[in-house]
Image: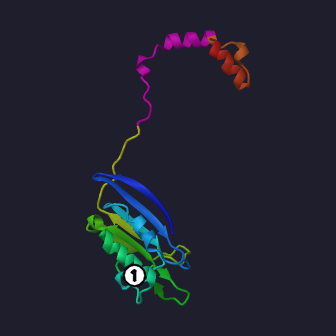
Amino acid sequence: METMGIALKTDTGYTTVINCYRPPDKAIDITQFDRIFVNDTTILTGDFNAKHTLWGSETEDDTGLAIEIAMDKHNYVCINNGAGTRQNYSGTMSHLDLTIVSSKLSGKSSWKVISDCTGSDHLPIHIELAQSLYSEYDTEPKFLFHKADWVDFKEHFKASFTADLATEDVNLLANVLRKQ
């Protein structure tokens, strides 16, 4: 299984979001699922290629059953609403893309499929979490222009900027300016 994650700083701490892809032709290993249930503020989402009635499939497969066992073991909930997430070649819908959240986040989470397939056989999923992201404001460097001695600066610049500085050789210019 392929995974990629990110930790988001929220107003209540960190929330981990892990995107997962399990190729359909790979044998299921339940320990893989145990490793991705990280903590009680985690969202697992992606193409698990798993079938289970819990998320709307008409049938269940070994992968779906393994995910159900891991969800029970780690106290997680699938927040899919039963809508299909992948359009099969026959035009029917599959339920292979899941969003699984820790029980702590389940009451704060919403999930829906967006009907625009954007050229893929998988439909986009919109997940919302009722938590605010923590914002750290990057401040631009502040220059105190009103405290600058512009007369002295102008005189120093005129004295330093001589004809030998009129060059396109950046290294030569840097060496000349360092000496002054």
Picture residue at 53% right of the left edge, 73% below the top: 118
* In-image side of 137 versus 166 (left or right): left
Relative height, residue 162 to residue 92 (above, below): above
State left or right for residue 19 relative to residue 106. Answer: right
Up-down: is 114 above or below 5?
A: below
State the extent of the magenta-drawn residues as a range: 139-159
Residue at 35%, 47% in the rendered image:
135
Q: Tell me residue 151's x, y (percent).
A: 50, 11
Q: Where's residue 122, x and y in %?
A: 50, 76
Magenta span contains residue 177: no
**Residue in the picture at 34% in, 68% down:** 101
> Which quadrant is home to the C terminus?
top right
What secondary structure predominates along the stretch shown in magenta? helix
Quick check: can you spot residue 77? no
Count the marks: how many? Answer: 1
Asked if residue 156 is among those painted magenta in the image, a careful observer would answer yes
Provide the secondary structure element on which disc 1 rests: helix
| Front residue of this view, candidates 145 and 55 | 55
Q: Residues within 10 Å of mark 1 (few under 14, many from 20)?
A: some
Horizontal placement of 110 versus 154: left or right?
left
Q: Is residue 82 above or below residue 22?
A: below
Of the pair 102 and 88, the residue shown nearer to us: 102
x, y percent for residue 98: 41, 74
Residue nearest the observer in this picture, 82 or 1: 1
Query: What amino acid is at disc 1?
Result: Leu
Where is mark 1, residue-wise? 65
Question: What colour scheme was applied to this rendering of the protein?
Answer: rainbow
Q: Locate residue 39: give its quadrant.
A: bottom left
Residue 176 shows up from this direction: yes
Q: Would you identify the image quadrant in which residue 59 lies?
A: bottom left
